[in-house]
């Protein structure tokens, strides 16, 4: 289940490559584009009027997922193409541009296993240029190209340098170097990549030395860097072909249907907050027609009315999540919850989290998982802020399966606090860890930011010895931070810090990066204090049962 979450600044903003957008509102002709049956059907695509975050009207292309009739008035559930699903909504007939409607292709009905005919609407027909039709030419078919990287083994020499050549890192660029830009580099097989054991050094720039760190040659890594991770987070490219059968909460998207693509809960009341869900969650069917779903904020049990909730609160003794409190500093606490011992709470937590996580699937078997719930304390009790879950036994070094900050607490630093706590547990366990993929778009942003700040904090804290440039290896960064080596390398490449200069690797920290990091750390007020953590890791592999 994996995701952190701070709201998307550009949730409604236009992205490059988005299709079907026109600024001027088209004039709808009610009878211009109806199906042969005289109605708009599911699977149609057409421009739909919406307001973006700048409060401007726009007409993005959308797909009709469902149609319903309320008191003689039709409503259409639309998904905006190239937008996140959390922006899907019910719209009225007046917001549809019927002049540009695209109907789905008709497909021949094929028998299903039980002998009944079945069909699925195909993608809408696309307009073929008249010139191509007239000339009888066949339109070119887009070809998908996959880049593969052949990576040398750990102790192989890299082109242009010796196997134990040190990597250097510098806060100032060397002469003849172009200024550092924040961009993602795609590493080709011929490009040398630092290994994990060679040291890196840090240099000053423009005459004012800040820091210097050394990186290492050796083996090349997989190209699963943060830059390419962005693609793997939001698409099936780059992720495993199927989720693991035990423990994984990743959704393989092979069983998506119209029902699970649509939000089914209108509103959730949780304590003093009302939450508007972003995605589908498999709450009981009879609850999906309610205007508001009421949840107990301490045990997360759901009720169909305020009266049911009030009656439940007279019997509910909980004022904090079940399980052990393993951290407390100020008003912030963390509780460790065993998915086997507290199954009801864990399942209710998964149902709530699924309302805000799209890339994960829900399993009612919570036994293989531990849940770490972050709470904020006041006179009424410990109120849930967010949580993350992790497998009791992970063969792939995952230290997070799902991660979520509830919407009322987003953009307040709680997302990074959850991530920092997950790595603090990994430090106590003596392991390196990484979040389970794919991350949501918000989760990816939060992890990128955390990795960047944590690694820059290490590099800028290095001190030179006997006047020489300070040196550090990628393995050492990984051991200090408990961040997996692949994530360390991908972050250095995302920040464009790694350079090859005079036969060695240097990590170049430009003034802009250093100043930006210092400003970001001044805003980061919430930090984990390891002295307040009371946690003893368990060896789950030696236990007969979880």
Image (spheres, rainbow, N blue to C red):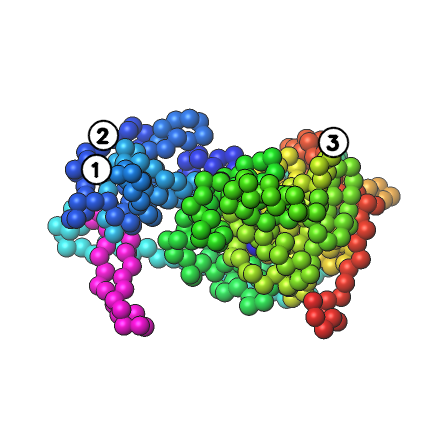
- Overall secondary structure of the magenta section: loop
Q: Mark 1 points at which residue?
A: 99
For the residues bearing labels 2 and 3, Cβ distance under 8 angstroms = no
Above or below, 495 against 476 in this view is above
Residue 76 is a magenta residue: no
Where residue 163 sits: x, y (%)? Answer: 70, 61
Q: Give the range drawn in magenta.
A: 105-129
Say which quarter of the image contains residue 395.
Answer: bottom right
Query: Considering only order in the chain, which callout, 1 or 3, is on the residue closer to the N terminus?
Result: 1
Query: Considering only order in the chain, which callout, 2 or 1, is on the residue closer to the N terminus?
Result: 2
Q: Can residue 421 be seen in this view?
A: no
Where residue 50 sits: x, y (%)? Answer: 36, 33
Side of 80 where 176 appears, left or right: right
Front residue of this view, candidates 116 and 230: 116
* Residue depth check, mark 3 versus mark 1: number of the one nearer the observer: 1
Residue 120 is a magenta residue: yes
Q: Name the residue under label 3.
A: 208
């Amino acid at each position: 289940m994996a995701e952190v979450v701070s709201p998307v600044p550009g949730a409604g903003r236009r992205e490059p490559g988005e299709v079907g957008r026109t600024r001027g509102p088209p004039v709808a002709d009610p009878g211009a584009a109806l199906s042969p049956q005289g109605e708009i059907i599911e699977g149609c695509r057409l421009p739909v009027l919406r307001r973006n975050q700048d409060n401007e009207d726009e007409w993005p292309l959308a797909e009709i997922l469902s149609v319903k009739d309320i008191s003689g008035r039709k409503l259409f559930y639309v998904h905006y193409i190239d937008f996140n699903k959390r922006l899907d909504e019910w719209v009225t007939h007046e917001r549809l541009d019927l002049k540009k409607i695209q109907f789905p292709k008709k497909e021949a009905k094929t028998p299903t296993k039980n002998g009944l005919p079945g069909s699925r609407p195909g993608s809408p027909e696309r307009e073929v240029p008249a010139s191509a039709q007239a000339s009888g030419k066949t339109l070119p078919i887009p070809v998908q190209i996959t880049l593969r990287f052949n990576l040398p083994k750990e102790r192989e020499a890299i082109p242009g340098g010796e196997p134990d050549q040190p990597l250097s890192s510098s806060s100032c660029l060397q002469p003849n170097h172009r200024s550092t830009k924040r961009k993602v580099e795609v590493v080709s097989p011929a490009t040398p990549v630092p290994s994990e054991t060679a040291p890196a050094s840090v240099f000053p720039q423009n005459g004012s030395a800040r820091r210097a760190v050394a990186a290492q040659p050796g083996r090349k890594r997989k190209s699963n860097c943060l830059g390419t991770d962005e693609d793997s987070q939001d698409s099936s490219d780059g992720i495993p072909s199927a989720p693991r059968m035990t423990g994984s909460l990743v959704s393989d998207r092979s069983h998506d249907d119209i029902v699970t693509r649509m939000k089914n809960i209108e509103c959730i009341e949780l304590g003093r907050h009302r939450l508007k869900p972003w995605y589908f969650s498999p709450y009981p069917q009879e609850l999906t027609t309610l205007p508001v779903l009421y949840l107990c904020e301490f045990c997360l049990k759901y009720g169909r009315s305020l009266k049911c909730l009030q009656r439940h609160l007279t019997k509910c003794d909980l004022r904090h999540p079940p399980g052990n409190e393993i951290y407390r500093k100020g008003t912030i606490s963390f509780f460790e919850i065993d998915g086997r011992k507290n199954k009801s709470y864990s399942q209710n937590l998964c149902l709530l989290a699924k309302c805000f996580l799209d890339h994960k699937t829900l399993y009612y078997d919570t036994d293989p998982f531990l849940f770490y719930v972050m709470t904020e304390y006041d006179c009424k009790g410990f109120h849930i802020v967010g949580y993350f879950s992790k497998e009791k036994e992970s063969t792939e070094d995952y230290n997070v399966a799902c991660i979520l900050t509830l919407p009322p607490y987003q953009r307040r630093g709680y997302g990074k606090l959850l991530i920092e706590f997950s790595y603090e547990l990994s430090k106590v366990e003596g392991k390196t860890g990484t979040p389970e993929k794919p991350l949501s778009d918000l989760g990816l942003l939060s992890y990128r930011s955390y990795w960047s700040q944590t690694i820059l904090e290490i590099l800028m804290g290095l001190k030179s010895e006997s006047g020489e440039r300070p040196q550090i290896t990628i393995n050492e960064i990984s051991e200090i931070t408990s961040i997996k080596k692949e994530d360390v390398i991908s972050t250095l490449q995302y920040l464009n810090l790694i350079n090859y200069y005079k036969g060695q690797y240097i990590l170049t920290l430009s003034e802009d990066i250093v100043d930006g990091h210092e400003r970001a750390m001044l805003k980061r007020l919430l930090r984990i204090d390891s002295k307040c953590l009371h946690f003893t890791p368990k060896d789950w592999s030696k236990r007969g049962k979880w």
